[in-house]
Amino acid sequence: MLNNTEFFTVRVAAKLALTPEIAQFELVATSGQTLPPFAAGAHIEVQLPGGLQRSYSLCNAPSENHRYQLGVLHDTNSRGGSQAMHTQVALGDVLHISAPRNHFPLAARARRSLLLAGGIGITPMLSMAWQLAADAVPFELHYCTRSSAQAAFAPMLEQTPYRERVHLHVDDGAAAQKINLAALLNTPETDVHVYVCGPQGFINAVMTTARAAGWLESQLHMELFNAEVISAEEDAAFEVEIASSGQVVKVAAQQTVVQALALAGIDVQISCEQGICGTCLTRVVSGTPVHRDQYLTPEEQAANDQFTPCCSRASSARLVIDLGPI
Ligand code: FES
């Protein structure tokens, strides 16, 4: 069994264009061994050409241990990650990846699950659907895309044993097939869980509708793809001090903490650079962060003892941070 705490090498065993914008990758261990196991909703970090690192959800059945499948959208607003996957990663290439990590697990003992996917947000839902089907837990998978041509995984879903649980909703189709969130989420039920993944607008629509209908926060689970990177005109410069060394680094108004530290020769591991994944999570010893992430809960943010330096800032003149492991 491979070590599941470190990066290891895999080979691209298949790369398939599902649509002009979405490619499916199949990764296998270069060692010929089985891959570290994963649970539904998990993702891996992939190190890409050019020093980038990005996280991608695993979309195959968690029972499979011979491959990881990823679905990657070639985002025209890409900061390099999806572009590198599409244009620089080829069949047979060797990639360094992390063991699977999971910030979006299925709730234990759910009586029924509603999986709501917007666009490429379908990817973690696929592994969830495989797991729920294997566990014989009732579920519905609602897959929403702008057009049927963009429903990259629809043909594959039609071949699955759980195809009757899948509902495809396309924006350019007949009114009757469009998703009706108010009707779908109308009645909160005990032990039923709702999972949503996709762009911010889609998640906001689902969460707003569900909360208005009275669903409990503990029943609602979300994973964001492509957060809006918040920057504000009034962003001010501040300093960060490294607790272990006392080194002080100035962060300019238009710089992120990660960028300022990198210029000072201090590397912080990053992935999404949007406050989604938590890879850069750093302990705060003193000072007051301004949280701009979607990763920490409101309670965790209010504690002000950790922050995401890829996007979050400080309202105090200085933030003392501890770069040791959290
Ligand atoms: Fe993902 Fe900072 S790199 S939260």
Image (cartoon, grey):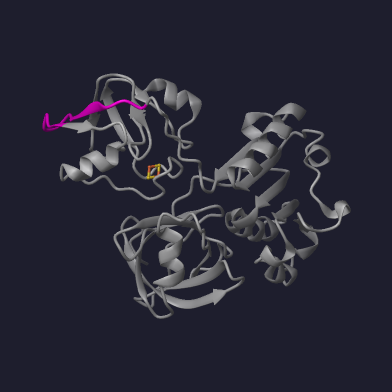
252 relative to 5, above or below? above
Quarter of the picture for ligand 1? top left
Question: Outermost residue toward the front?
Answer: 233
- Name which residue lies at 37% across and 32% down: 312
Relative horizontal placement of residue 278, taking residue 118 as reference (left or right): left
Q: Quadrant of the N terminus?
A: bottom left
The magenta stretch is 235-248
Relative horizontal placement of residue 198, taking residue 308 as reference (left or right): right
Q: Is residue 109 visible?
A: no
Q: Quadrant of the C terminus?
A: top left
Q: Is residue 239 magenta?
A: yes
- Name which residue lies at 43% across and 73% down: 28
310 relative to 116, above or below? above
Q: Is residue 303 visible?
A: yes
State the image coordinates of residue 9 (x, y, percent, origin top left). Answer: 33, 69
Q: Nearer the viewer, residue 304 or 202?
A: 202
Q: Quadrant of residue 80?
A: bottom left
State the image coordinates of residue 265 (x, y, percent, origin top left). Answer: 15, 45
Relative horizontal placement of residue 192, taking residue 258 as reference (left or right): right
Question: Outermost residue toward the right?
Answer: 176
163 relative to 319, above or below? below
State the image coordinates of residue 40 (x, y, percent, origin top left). Answer: 56, 54
Relative horizontal placement of residue 36, taking residue 249 as reference (left or right): right
State the image coordinates of residue 160 (x, y, percent, origin top left). Answer: 71, 69
Count of number-bearing discs: 0
Q: Quadrant of residue 71?
A: bottom right
Q: Is residue 95 magenta?
A: no
